[in-house]
Image (spheres, helix red, strand yellow):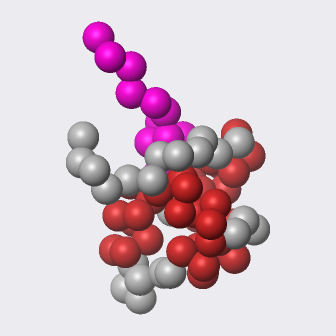
Amino acid sequence: MSNEHALSIWRNSQKTPLTQEALGEKLGISRWWVNRLEKREATPSFDLALKIENLTAGKVTAKDFAKEVAQ
């Protein structure tokens, strides 16, 4: 798995890349919260995960926020 989170990759791949602050405004959360999600320091609520999935047209899903399990 890449070090960069799928949300960060999506955000920066937009025609006009979104700042964390702009993404937070679209999602109704703070820039700080977006940063924590992208650093994998927080997990979104179910509702927020659905908002993210809808906003990204399915490019970022709840699975992208799941913790990796060592096997």
Q: Where residue 2 sits in the image (x, y, percent)?
A: 24, 48
User: Residue placed at 64% from the left, 60% from the top?
Assistant: 33
Above or below, comparing residue 20 to residue 58 in the picture = below
Residue 62 shows in this picture: yes
User: Residue placed at 38% from the left, 19% from the top?
Assistant: 69
User: Residue placed at 49% from the left, 33% from the top?
Assistant: 66
Name the quadrant of the C terminus. top left
Above or below, comparing residue 41 to residue 12 in the picture = above
Q: Residue furthest left?
A: 2
Q: Residue furthest top?
A: 71
Majority secondary structure of the magenta segment? loop
User: Residue placed at 38% from the left, 54% from the top?
Assistant: 6
The magenta region covers 57-71
Residue 48 highlighted magenta (yes or no): no
Residue 54 shows in this picture: no
Residue 60 highlighted magenta (yes or no): yes
Above or below, comparing residue 44 to residue 26 in the picture = above
Name the quadrant of the N terminus. top left
Q: Where residue 10 sits in the image (x, y, percent)?
A: 40, 65
Q: Where residue 7 sits in the image (x, y, percent)?
A: 45, 59
Q: How many marks?
A: 0
Q: 63 and 35: which one is in front? A: 35
Q: Quadrant of residue 22?
A: bottom right
Left or right: where 27 falls relative to 58: right
Q: Where residue 29 sits in the image (x, y, percent)?
A: 72, 65
Left or right: where 13 falls relative to 36: left
